[in-house]
Image (cartoon, grey):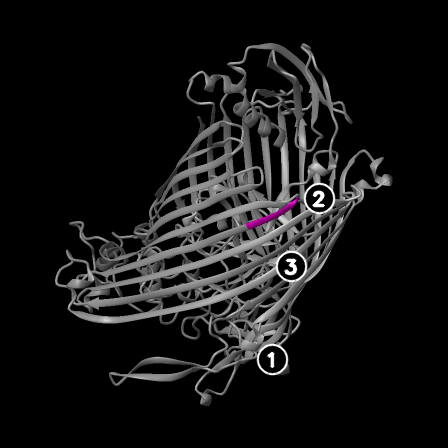
Amino acid sequence: MRQLLIYLSLVLFISTGTVWAQNTSLTGTITDKTTSEPMIGVTVLVKGTTIGTVTNYDGVYNLQVPDNTEMLVYSFIGYQTQEVAYTGQSVINIQLQDDSENLDEVVVTGYGIQKKGTYTGSVEVVSAEKIEQVPVASFDQALQGRAPGVVSVGSSGRPGAAATVRIRGVSSINAGNDPLYIMDGIPITAGQFSALNQNDIENVSILKDATATSLYGSRASNGVIVITTKRGKSDGRTSIQYRGQFGLNTIARDNFNMMNTAQKIQYEEELGLKTYTPEEKLDLMKTNTNWFDVVLRDALTQSHELSARGGNENTRFYMSGGYYFQEGIQYRSDFERFTYRLNLDNKVSDRANLGVNLSFGYESNNNTVSGGAASTNVYNPIFAARLLNPYLAPYTSDGSYNNEGFPFANPIEQIMLNENKNNTLKIVGGVFFDVELAKNLVFKTNLGADFYDYRSYGFLHPDSEWGRGFNGKITEGFRRNFRLTPTNTLRYKFQIAEKHDFNVLAGQEIISNTNRGFSVGARNIPTDKLRVLAVASEIDGWGGDGYDYTVASFFGNMAYSYNYKYLADLSIRRDGSSRFGVDNRWGTFWSAGLGWNIQEEEFIKGIGWIDQLKVRASVGETGNYNIGNYEHQALYGYTTYIEQSAAFYAQAANDELTWERKFKANVALEMAFLRKYRAKVDFYSETTKDMLFVVPRSITTGIGGRLENIGEMNNKGFEVELDGQLIQKGDFGFHLNANLSYNLNRVTKLYNNLEEIDQGYTKITLDQPLGTFYMARWAGVDESTGKGLWYTADGEVTDTYSDAHRVLLEGKTYLPPLTGGFTGTFSYKSLQLSAFFSWMADKWLINNTRFFTESHGMFASYNQSADLLDYWKQPGDKAKHPNPEYQDNEFDTRLLENASFLRLKNLTLSYNLNKNFVQKTMFFNSCRVYAQGQNLLTFTGYKGIDPEFYGVMEANMYPHVRTITLGIDLGF
């Protein structure tokens, strides 16, 4: 498949170079020297020009060669490039020799670029083709299942919502678990990727072990994700591309079976909640509302992008502009984005280069009003749609909003009357300059900035139920963040005796971050026609805050290779952070890695089917400083008391507060064989020490606790990745890529010699995974009495619920130990079908929605799940639910569900139009059309709205969407 793609792209790219030449015909066949099989997609170029072609499916090429040609160049990825003198021949046949070293991908790692073959770190590369054109607004959601050891979960289907990303598990309880994100050498804020255009990304390198991450020191405990954007070319040509998509969004999955009108009337009468006359029943039966259909809709999505890429030997550029719009399937939850990118590389002289990276994004979100933002608040339209009875109509006969008989506000009316908006301006940019001070000694300076402005706006209509109590209300908020990162490095490469290769790096970096924000609310609005703060007559509330932090760093790295056979990598970094006390601000982090390219040994070179065989290992230490900016200081808070300013003791000082440290160990085996298969397995163990945890204190001190370095946690596991061209028969091919990860999390130390900490529905327990559930076990319904039954902690059966019955449910945690994904790609000539699946196994989740929709008690007057009709009525009944007279819902194992899933995440069918046909237009040189579906199928036993959720319990989440799009890529 890879060969076919290369073949098509290269044909479109270089074929125009043959049109205008005054030339002679040349033909030939190119074969693999080892197998003698013809090679598809080999590039044949006239040296020093862009005139060339590629071989067809039979390995044959035809080229019109200019009369002044002196040399021809034959090249293909994974093979040694050959240069052949041209003396006017009409036929040149070539055999290419595979080159094990060229099998290595180029990966962007800590402050540099290396080949995987000479690198001892654990790095996964997600290429552009895997994330381009995926119909999601935030690129982190496109990472799910793409790389082993990386969990990316979208806990909301809201347009533009960010994913939760974890690399090799969770390693901290109170400090952050997000990885560090670097884009073109600039640290960027996690969770703000909806303002970036993922089609601008060339690849994503995911750094996992100590060798790969330790050069980032105190920020690298949770791994590093390095984003490399596209750059220009130096071939003297400019390629312009348009990409467009149009599609439809629908709810991906709704597994709730709520009562219809007939069922709800029956249920209410059976429980004695209401008594209806026959006439009243007939009148109610005229309405049977599915409230989900009222607050949700089928929604449109579209994207457009125009990019230009080109340059010459002195100046290279990449420039793009994009527009993305997605209607939310929930009314008033739309997302709109405008993006612009410019990457410019200029060769100032033979020794110096100057460049600019600039990304501009402006996004606007129109959000549904959610009141207190609680998932179990009826201001949440999803929750309201669950609870409203089906015999209530959303509209009256004249089309106005209906409010008769409602227990709370009509959600569709509140959605349409009120507003909740925000917009973000995001700029990430940098200027870099590098100069070769002496032979192979390069100094580089990079000044990077990450900037965003965020503005929120809320309006509660005076006539809406939510706004009536305020006589209308307006709230506005603003937040600005600016992070400046100057980085200076000095790199020296040298060789001794042509076998000893050294690459030495020394660097210095400073991070300075400033954040300011304020908000204000006002009530009593004279008219809904004027929706600005100035017209309100009363201030409702105000607030403002600000914070700063600084990190200073010095680092060094040495990479060594002996004859491309034996490898070593050493790193050290010294970080100082303003987030810790004066005596504990500095920390030292390090790594050491070794590698052995076994295929370079003489005893392996004779084994023809082995292309690459590599063993690597690493150890080292990284840190975590993702806590508040002033946690080490004694702080006072300020408020009002009896309309007077007042201060209160808010936080105790801890001058001993310092970094969390993570010790990482990794060993791996990589293999490439038969020129079309690859396999890799990593084994790792990562231990967090000095873990930051809030240690409780007596409330008589005025505070509930203090952050301290007290605990330890371990993550260990393995990762497997397989890749291969399983079938290549003529024009038909099938390529498979699959990955699997297993991570075992264990808490190994707590404060004050504690062995467990009760957190309600989970318990932190020594030698158990974080997030292990701690609940009473449901034992079913007593067939003779209709009472609910539970197991006591000792295993006895009782009909009385108590928190004392809770036990640790070993092996059941919300953190899935098994994750992965696989992609199968079928190709036939210019047609391609690709199916990508992601999965998680042994993942558990409390279905909190069922607590409200399967409740005989206080919620019985609201609509309920049809499953609740299966309740005990008389002795001998084998019922799912108890008699309403006895029990209501409890947070027991009835609500704990297996949320493991397999999801068809993306299915794409594409076709590349015949290049000769396309070029006859005299305007286009390539055209690809495609159709794709996102979240098409989900296989799971979870009964909630979606198993793809990160957390202990899920309730009324914004549903994930199924997206069907049609797209076109045009090259000019």
Question: Label 1: few (<14), some or many (≥20) within 10 Å?
Answer: some
Residue type at mark 2 is Gly
Label 3–label 2 contact, CB within 8 A: no
Image location of residue 544, percent across then percent down = 32, 69
**Mark 1 residue element:** helix
Q: Which residue is mark 1?
A: 751
Q: Locate the N terminus by quadrant.
A: top right
Q: Which residue is mark 2?
A: 117
In the displayed structure, 560 sits above or below 953; it is: above
Label 1–label 3 contact, CB within 8 A: no
Q: Which residue is mark 3?
A: 743
Residue type at mark 1 is Tyr
Image location of residue 240, percent across then percent down = 44, 30
> What kind of secondary structure does the magenta stretch mostly adopt?
strand
**Which region of the structure is painted magenta?**
440-444
In this rendering, the label closer to the viewer, 2 or 1: 2
In the rendered structure, the answer to whether residue 71 lies left or right of residue 194 reads right
Which residue appears at 40% of the width and 66% of the height? 852
